[in-house]
Amino acid sequence: MKLTIAATETKNLKVLELAKARFAEQHPGVTIEIEIVPKEILKQMVRDGHPPDLIEWYGSDIGRLLDRGILMDLAPMVAEASFELGDFFTSVRSAVTDQGMIGALPVMAEMPGVFYNKRHFDEAGVSYPEEGWHWDDFIKKARKLTVYDADGDVVRYGAYMVPRLLPIEPLAWSNGGAFLSEEGMKATGYLDDTATIDAIRKYIEVFYPMELTPFQDVGHETWVSCFNHQRMSMYYDANWTIKPMKPMHRELFGAVMPPRMGDGPYPNIVQVYGYGISTQASDAELAWAFLQELASPYTEAGQEWAKHNLAVSRPVAASSGQEADPLYAPFIAAMDSARLGAFDRSSMRLWKYWNNDLLRDWIVRGGRIHLEKRLAEISREYDREYDKAGEYDE
C-alpha cells in the first residue's frame, strides 16, 4: 500500500516526516511518498487528474474545491474521529467548512498584528497601544515616535507599514467597507464603496511624506536586522515576525491587534492552511488515518505545527504555550472573531485585478491616482469576468 503527499513549502517537511515516522510504527508495510512541489505544479497535477492522495490546502475557497470534486468531504469521518471539530477556533472551522461539508483538516494559521518597541515608547513618553485602539491613535503615536537628526532627516521611523494588500482589508471592515461580498462573487458596491476607498486612501497616505514609515517590503530574511537596528518603533505585519526573535527581542517588543479605522468592531483577517484528501485517493481510509496523525490537535505532529505558525486549535494553543505567550496571546485571542479575506474567498481571483504590485504603484504615485475611478474599474472587471464564466477556473 502506498500514500502520496504533496507540499509546497519545504518548512513543512519536518512535520510531514514526523507524522510519517509515527504512522509507520502503527502501519508497517505502508509506503508514504512525500514530494515537495511548487504551487503551480500542484495545481497542474490536480488539473491533469493525477493529484496526490493528500493535497496541501493553502487557504483558497474550500467550497469550490468540494463542489468540483477535488477534495473529499471529511465530515462523516470527523464525526467518528478522536478529536472534535469544536477543538478548532471558530474562524478556522469556518475556513475549512462549507454547507456542512469539511474539505480539509487545518494545521496552522497566520494573522497580521502590530509589534511595538517598548523602549522607544518609554523614551518618548508614549503610552503602549491597547486592544481596541483607533487608527488616529496609531498615527499620533507614530508621529511622536519618529526621530530626526540635526539636518531634519529621519533616523528612526515611528512605524513600518507593509506595502501589501492583506493588512488593509480588516481596516476596511472596521470602517464599514469590504473588498468583496461575503460569498466572494461581487466587487461592485464593496471594493468601490466609499468606506473601502477611505480605508485604502488612509493606508496609502501614511507613506506621505516618507517620514512615518519607509517604503520597503521587509521579508523574513531582513526582520532580524530590523530588530537589531531598531529603525522602526512599530511594525504592522504578520505573526511570523515572532519566530526569528531572540530572547532579547522578546523582552523588547509587545504585540497588539491592529487599530480600528472606523467605529465598527475589528475582526482581524486570518489565513488558514491544512491538508485534504483527494477524491481520487487510492485508499481513502488509509489517507484519513494518516491525515489524523498529521493534523489532530492531540498527536505529536499535529502539535508540531505551532512551531511554524499560529495554532489553529485551543488544545494546541495551550500545549504550545502560545496562549500564555505575551507576543502570541493577542493573536490567539483574536482567532475566534477573525475572518477569511477576499483573496481567499475568491480563490485568489481578485489578485488578477488588484495585487501588491498595483498597490505599490499607487503608493509611488500618491495623490496622482484617482482611487474612486480605478477601484470602480477593477470592480466592474471582476464582476464581468464572474458573470461571463459563471465561476472561475482554478
Image: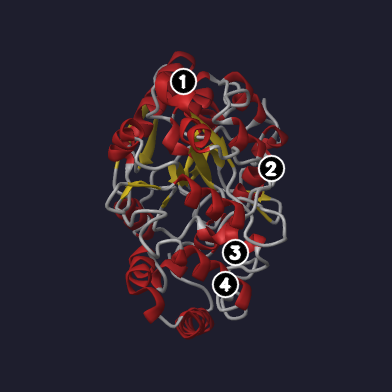
> Few, some or many C-alpha atoms within 10 Å of disc 2 (few <14, some 14-19, many ≥20)?
some
Look at the numbered disc 4 and give the secondary structure of its residue. helix
Q: Crowding near pointer 4: few (<14 within 10 Å), some, many (20+)?
A: many
Residue at the image position 53 percent from the left and 55 percent from the top: 139
**Which residue is denoted by mark 4 in the rendering?**
198
Decide which of tag 1 and tag 3 comes sooner along the chain.
1
Q: Residue at x 62, y 60 (%)?
A: 261
| Structural distance between the alpha carbons of marks 1 and 3 | 45 Å
Residue 70: x %, y % from top left: 49, 55
Q: Amino acid at mark 1?
A: Phe
The one of 312 and 72 positioned closer to us in this rendering: 312
Q: Which label lies toward us, 2 or 3? A: 3
Viewer-nearest of labels 1 and 3? 3
For residue 172, the mark is 3
Instruction: Name the quarter where the N terminus is drawn.
Output: top left
Label count reads 4
Q: Which residue is mark 2?
A: 336
Residue 111 in view, yes or no: no
- For residue 203, above or below residue 244: below
Going by the numbered disc 4, the residue's amino acid type is Asp
> Does residue 282 lie above or below 386 as drawn?
above
Give the mark toward the camera: 2 or 1: 2
> What label does residue 23 carry, if any?
1
Q: Residues within 10 Å of mark 3 (few under 14, many from 20)?
A: many
* Marks 4 and 3 in Cβ contact (< 8 Å): no
Q: Give the percent coordinates (x, y) of residue 245.
A: 40, 27
| Quadrant in the picture for residue 387 | bottom right
